[in-house]
Image: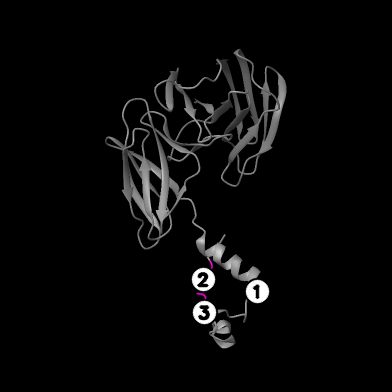
């Protein structure tokens, strides 16, 4: 949605002044309301790139010009920065241990909007956007994780990863077809499975244009983390992240290299 220019209210200023306010002449009440709504629209900030540096990650993204961008940690600390004249911002986020989780927001003219999902930053496994009810997205260049599993407490599961651009991808679980989909223009696919993955040992196969992979899963129930919004558990060469969603639910994200 684009921003509209908001004309001021000019009581009894005359038809010529109203017409001058709009290239198309006098606006109807509906048109005026629509323009006001567009003027009040504040886009969510986004992260375009994350690079591992000494002590953390260097993040780059976009936000509204003049806004204050804030990267906040669960403990209440945070880093703030203002975008440049082109709306680009840069900051460094500290990371310790196996990983850290952050919320990103921007504030402009007293209005605050949250970015989609949370940022998970790991020195070993890259930078990820964790999205409630959807697949995690890699945002650091060269992140080597072709398969990601996102599961909620009810067992709903999304499989995501990379394949050929616009390629067809299928998913099998223990030999049964569980879903199919198509990768986007960047080669990223996200497939919601037709049913839950049962606890215990399972064989997951992903195949299609530009991808052929099999993984053995040993799943345990998704349970809330204790003492904070995040629990990080190494799983061989991969990682499991149990995290609290903005709506108060819990979701498990498994990075399967």
* Distance of label 1 from label 3 (alpha carbons): 15 Å
Q: Which residue is under mark 1?
A: 28
Q: Nearer the viewer, residue 162 or 240?
A: 240
Crowd band around label 3 with a 10 angstrom C-alpha radius: few (<14), some (14–19), many (20+): few
Q: Are marks 1 and 2 in contact (CB under 8 Å)?
A: no
Q: Which residue is under mark 3?
A: 10
Colour scheme employed for the rendering of this structure: one colour
- Give the side of residue 203 with respect to residue 43, left or right: right
Q: Are marks 1 and 3 in contact (CB under 8 Å)?
A: no
Q: Give the number of the mark in front: 2 or 3.
A: 3
Magenta-highlighted residues: 4-9
- Give the side of residue 38 with respect to residue 108, left or right: right
Q: Which mark is residue 6?
A: 2
Residue drawn at (40%, 60%), measured in percent from left and top? 65
Compared to residue 32, the image places residue 246 above or below, namely above
User: Residue 64's spot in the image, x, y percent?
Assistant: 43, 58
Tell me the chief SS of the magenta region. loop
Where residue 173 sits, quadrant-wise, is top right
Residue drawn at (53%, 27%), measured in percent from left and top? 251
Residue drawn at (58%, 41%), measured in percent from left and top? 187
Q: For numbered disc 1, what is the local secondary structure?
A: loop
User: Residue 31's spot in the image, x, y percent?
Assistant: 63, 70
User: Residue 44's spot in the image, x, y percent?
Assistant: 48, 51
- Give the side of residue 34 with respect to residue 57, left or right: right
- Give the side of residue 252 with respect to residue 99, left or right: right
Whether residue 168 is visible, yes or no, is no
Where residue 158 sits, quadrant-wise, is top right
């Amino acid at each position: 949605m684009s921003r509209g220019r908001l004309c001021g209210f000019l009581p009894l200023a005359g038809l010529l002044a109203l017409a001058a306010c709009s290239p198309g002449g006098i606006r109807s009440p509906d048109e005026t309301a629509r323009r006001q709504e567009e003027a009040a629209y504040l886009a969510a900030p986004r992260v375009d790139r994350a690079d591992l540096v000494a002590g953390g990650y260097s993040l780059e993204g976009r936000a509204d010009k003049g806004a204050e961008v804030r990267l906040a940690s669960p403990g209440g600390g945070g880093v703030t920065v203002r975008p440049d004249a082109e709306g680009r911002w840069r900051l460094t986020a500290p990371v310790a241990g196996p990983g850290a989780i952050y919320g990103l927001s921007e504030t402009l003219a007293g209005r605050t909007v949250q970015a989609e999902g949370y940022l998970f930053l790991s020195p070993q496994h890259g930078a990820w956007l964790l999205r409630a009810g959807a697949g995690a997205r890699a945002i650091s260049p060269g992140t080597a994780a072709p398969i990601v599993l996102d599961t909620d407490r009810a067992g709903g599961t999304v499989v995501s990863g990379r394949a050929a651009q616009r390629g067809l991808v299928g998913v099998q679980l223990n030999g049964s077809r569980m879903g199919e989909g198509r990768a986007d223009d960047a080669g990223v696919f996200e497939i919601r499975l037709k049913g839950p993955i049962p606890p215990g040992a399972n064989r997951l196969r992903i195949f299609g244009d530009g991808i052929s992979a099999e993984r053995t899963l040993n799943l345990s129930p998704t349970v809330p983390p204790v003492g904070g919004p995040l629990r990080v558990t190494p799983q061989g060469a991969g990682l499991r992240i149990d995290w609290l969603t903005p709506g108060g639910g819990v979701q498990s994200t498994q990075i399967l290299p």
